[in-house]
Amino acid sequence: MLLVYTHKITPRVTYTFKHICRRVLGIEVRFTSKVEDFIAHDSLKMSYAKKPLSNELFVRSHDLLFDHGLSDLEINVQQWGNTKGFFATSERSDLPFDIFAASFYMLSRYEEYLPHVKDEYGRFLASESLAFHHKFLNQPVVDLWAYKLKDVLMQRFPDYNFPERKYTVQPVIDVPMAYYFKHKGFLRTIGGTLNDLRRLKLKQLYLRYTVLMGFKRDPYDTFKWIIRKQKANKIKFTVLFLIGDYSTYDKGISTTKKDFISLIKSVADYCNVGIKASYFSLNDVAILKKEKLKMEAITHIDLNAVRHSFSKLNLPISYRNLVELEINQDFTMGYIDTLGFRAGTCTPFQFYDLDYEVQTPLQINPYHCLDFALLKYDSLLDKTEHLQEVIDEVKAVNGIFTPVFHNYSFSNLDRWEGFRSLFNLILDSEE
């Protein structure tokens, strides 16, 4: 157990140290402001303050973890071995950067509360991030910093037996539309037909009616393949279905369709099932509650996992709504068009509410690869190389790799050619 001496034990201090020590390094951590307790402790210990007490392991603290609300922070990013660091310390500090303040900045998504340019859907862009501007978006820096702390602890306490964590994969399958042609209802089918004719999409028109007449499987109906993959793997998939009402943004299948209900139930027999929260539920907790209750009525299991439509987050409201409804797992934290580490970590972490200065029960599972982000690479070889680079970064810190694929990215449609093999590459990476 690591004992940390600090002049003031704040919610930010306990939150950040617990993530780095307990979640990343597997070390229990306690805190004290009493010098005598610190001196008496005969195992791992360090001080986190402006000055060291004596010659103990010491990291000079930045003011951020003792602050409240938002401040205008001066951030100077510098090279640090094979990675980057910011919030420089002093010569007496055993680490050249305050990794705890820097980690809090990344995990709390501090920068997303500050003024920034949004895209047309109101999303925070990768190009607005500190990590993008200083070229460390491709690294799980929080985990790398934690391992640098571990190196220093091992030098000071060579007899301590440090636990080792293992690289794992946590696949997420997003289902905004379970079927491309089937179960759309009469009006939507007629509208789709007229649209095919107007755009002279005769091949699609032919496919539409061969599917509707039962001669071919719907191209989006890849669930037999998904279940077969799940049966062959110990890794548990998380499958998130859109069950919200039809709207401008969400064009899923109605839960009045018995085949859709049966599909959700059959997938739930093998995989973890949650919801892809609809676009309008993002700011309306009543709509989100309705979708939660609807899914629980289908699966007869308490809803635990959510991912927001269009990967959109409105911080802190989106996450407060999940906390209010006792939904404890979120899979929205990532970028839609860029591979990498939006929160700087490949370790799930708790949502810290900066307005209330409190750690919440909501666990954020950051994703590092969305299938759409791979489409910008022309060849399958390019896609594979870039995907492998992200996997290697996660493996280097024995983290959790979370990819998000859609049910239709396993289809035979030209756009998604080769994506089954990319998914297989991810599953095989754990072996």
Image (tube, rainbow, N blue to C red):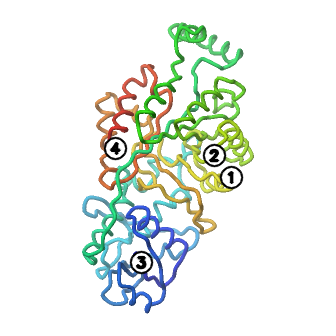
Spatial CA span between label 4 and label 3? 37 Å
Q: Residue at x 47, y 50 (%)?
A: 366
Q: Neighbour class for label 3 at 10 Å: few (<14), some, many (≥20)?
A: many
Q: Residue at x 47, y 30 (%)?
A: 226
Between residue 334 and residue 213, name the one nearer to us: 213
Image quarter where the C terminus lies is top left
Q: Neighbour class for label 2 at 10 Å: few (<14), some, many (≥20)?
A: many
Spatial CA span between label 1 and label 4? 34 Å
Dot 4: what SS?
A: loop
Between residue 289 and residue 93, name the one nearer to us: 289
Spatial CA span between label 3 and label 1? 36 Å
Q: Nearer the observer, disc 1 or disc 4?
A: 4
The relative height of residue 33 versus residue 330 in the rendered view (above or below) is below
Disc assigned to residue 325: 1
Query: Which callout, 3 or 1, points at the residue further toward the start of the chain?
Result: 3
Report which residue position mark 4 lands on.
430
Residues under numbered marks 1 and 2 in contact, where contact means CB atoms less than 8 Å apart: no
Query: Which callout, 2 or 3, points at the residue further toward the start of the chain?
Result: 3
